[in-house]
Image (cartoon, rainbow, N blue to C red):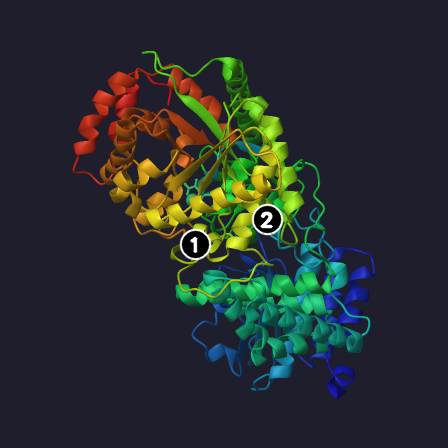
Amino acid sequence: MERVVARGPRNLLRQIREALAGGGPAQDRLDKVVRVIAGSMVAEVCSLYLRRAAGDMELFATEGLKREAVHVTRMKPGEGLVGEIMRQGRPINLSDAPSNPHFSYHPETGEDPYHAFLGVPLLRGGRAIGVLVVQNRTERIYDEDEIDDLQTIAMVLAEMVAAGEVVGQAEFKGVELQPHRPERLKGMRFADGLAIGVAVLHEAPVAPEKLLADDSTHEAKRLEQGLQRLRRQIDEMLDGSHGLVGQTFEVLEAYRMFAHSRGWNRSLEDAVRSGLTAEAAVERVRSEQRVQMSQTRDAYLRERLHDLEDLADRLLRILAGETPGSRVLPEDAVLIARNLGPADLLEYDRTKLRGLLLEEGSSASHASIVARALGIPCVGRLQNLRDRVNAGDPVIVDGEIGEAFLRPRPDVIEAVQARAAVREQRRAEFDRLRDTPAFTRDGGKVTLLMNAGLAVDLESLEMTGAEGIGLFRTEFQFMVAEELPRLDAQTALYARVMEAAGDRPVTFRTLDLGGDKVLPYLQAEREDNPALGWRAIRMGLDRPALLRMQLRALIAAARSRELQVMFPLVATVDEFRTARSLVDRELAWAQRRGRPIPERVRVGVMIETPALIWHLDALLPMTDFISVGTNDLMQYLFAADRGNPRVSDRYDLLSPPALRALKTIGDACADTGTPVSVCGEMAGRPLEAFALIALGFTRLSMPPAGIGPVKAMVLSLDAGAARRGLTAALKSGAGSVRNEIETLARKLNVAV
Ligand code: PEP
Ligand code: MG
């Protein structure tokens, strides 16, 4: 505690702040800043280099070197010690700089007599935007406290520079204080659509006015309290009382390791001691780690450093006193994040959220599914996204192609607006098709249903003209709730859904939790492979009280109408038999109490595990209908985690094994007269839907946005010709037959 009062560059930071606030030309203010730093660090030289937009570092101010060199001396990335600091994003501390191989001699600076050299980067969002150097004549190594102090000064300078407090953009054109040029990043399409809006950072940085502490003792206390709360939160989560499984658990274990790690804690405390606020300390430590992260080649280490970043975000939220859901969005917001859990997205105001850009993620993850369900265009896997974008930047989400435009030029905006207008027109055409029944050209009826999960989805029923809800994901209600939804809340939602659907059928799927759908309030054990673990019906059968409560709510909501319910992730006929018997028990329970019971109850099963494909002969007679969940079925068929970006898109659904598996299911259902639908995401993509119809499927359930395009496809389709044409593709020896199927569709003039 003594040190808190005794040392640190707090005084210096105050002087810098005063120097910068002093008014007058920017150059004078900068000169003053380097002068006070040199004085305080007892250095003969202090120089500030800032990064030009072209990437060069330019000497912007110096105390001790020749003034003629200012705005003349420049270094390329990697050139000289300054360039090396910028490249590495790390300090360089040398007792005799001229003898270092990286030293590059710039005679105009007159730096010959100086030997000792300490340079630190000005880091912002994981990038070096400048370098701050002190030099001394004598050969000496700067001690750790000095390095620390200079880093703190550099951090504050970096934030001030970025906020335009040091050099006005007008005065120093071309200085790359923060990314400001238009950029185009290539990523992957997670949810279709176009959006133009302003960037909102899911993980927001600390505002410059909150950088310097007025009272360091108080900040040290805040930091300690914040850290304590953080550790408690994580410990509680790990205690098992919050129901974490698999990956989430591992991440938290890493969190706990870091949260308790002396290194991290000490870095934070040191930063506060040097005069920063608790928030700024978190940001500074994070900034340094980010640079390290971008340089490590070790994927595992990179992941762990990501965890550490998340931890920093968590700590910042604690310090800000933020509670979940308290974030306010501007109009036309485009959310920028590394990755999002499905519930994270639902916390934002949907009426203002136009788009979503992710650094990571995968198209089959539930965050992407939620984005598609909400009709929010989403592009993921955008490298270094968060370092390239500032809050408030204009951005474009191109979910058609899978690209993001940051700070787009007016012509790009115009081009995208034109495309959006065409989309709008097509949508209007789809709207016109809304009441047109989906018949193929050769007279076959295709039933187009939509997937839903929240009350907000219900509007889409009218808008799209879907013929019903083929998959209602009941767990979404649980995921957005703070606590387990009670019986009456469940009943109310289901009744509302049936009400909105009117005569149209609704198929409710019982809770599909686990895997990547984790509830903070439901207890679960840690698992090594959550996708293969205790999820969906497995959880339901082991916790029959939960499943029965849900069935009770469904029966109560249906009153005397028809009820359709199906079970997810069934792997054996016995599981289905048991699940079905629970429905019977609940019906009997309602009947005994004289409650209304549905006029008809149809109980179905989702085919999501390959095992069932070879037991259809036993399964089909027991079930009233089948729904093929291709998202899961394909992840298990190809043994590729749908939530893991490294593997999720490795295999093509339009491949002989996948199509043959689907055909086996479709044929068995046709032979036994079992109603069958496909409700995975593929059903909503015209080319994939074309293949499904060619395989013989005539009931497709999809995200609402898919209905129009798929209907247009159906109306242009000769299903008989498609079926005949697909036979060759099914026999192909290729790993993917996407091209063949596309060629076939074009040959048949199908609108895919
Ligand atoms: C599926 O797995 O295909 C499916 C429809 O269910 P979910 O995406 O909710 O797992
Ligand atoms: Mg599924």
Front residue of 297/424: it is 424
- Circle 2: is it few (<14), some (14-19), or many (20+) Cα within 10 Å? many
- Image position of 246 with respect to 197: above or below: below
Front residue of 181/274: it is 274
Q: Does dot 2 land on a helix, a strand or a loop?
A: helix
Q: Between marks 2 and 1, how big is the CA–CA gap?
A: 17 Å
- Circle 1: is it few (<14), some (14-19), or many (20+) Cα within 10 Å? many
Looking at the rendering, in which quadrant would you find the N terminus?
Answer: bottom right
Q: Which mark is residue 478?
A: 2
Looking at the rendering, in which quadrant would you find the C terminus?
Answer: top left
Q: Position of residue 176 (x, y in %)?
A: 60, 52
Q: Quadrant of ligand 1?
A: top left
Q: Is residue 113 visible?
A: no
- Image position of 643 with respect to 658: above or below: below
Q: Does dot 1 land on a helix, a strand or a loop?
A: helix
Examine the image and state in which quarter residue 120 appears: bottom right
Amino acid of disc 1 = Arg
Q: How many marks?
A: 2
Amino acid of disc 2 = Phe
Residue 239 vs residue 541: left or right?
Answer: right
Residue 555 vs residue 438: left or right?
Answer: right
Front residue of 752/58: it is 752
Examine the image and state in which quarter residue 659 appears: top left
Q: Position of residue 506 (x, y in %)?
A: 51, 31
Q: Is residue 667 visible?
A: yes
Q: Which residue is mark 1?
A: 538
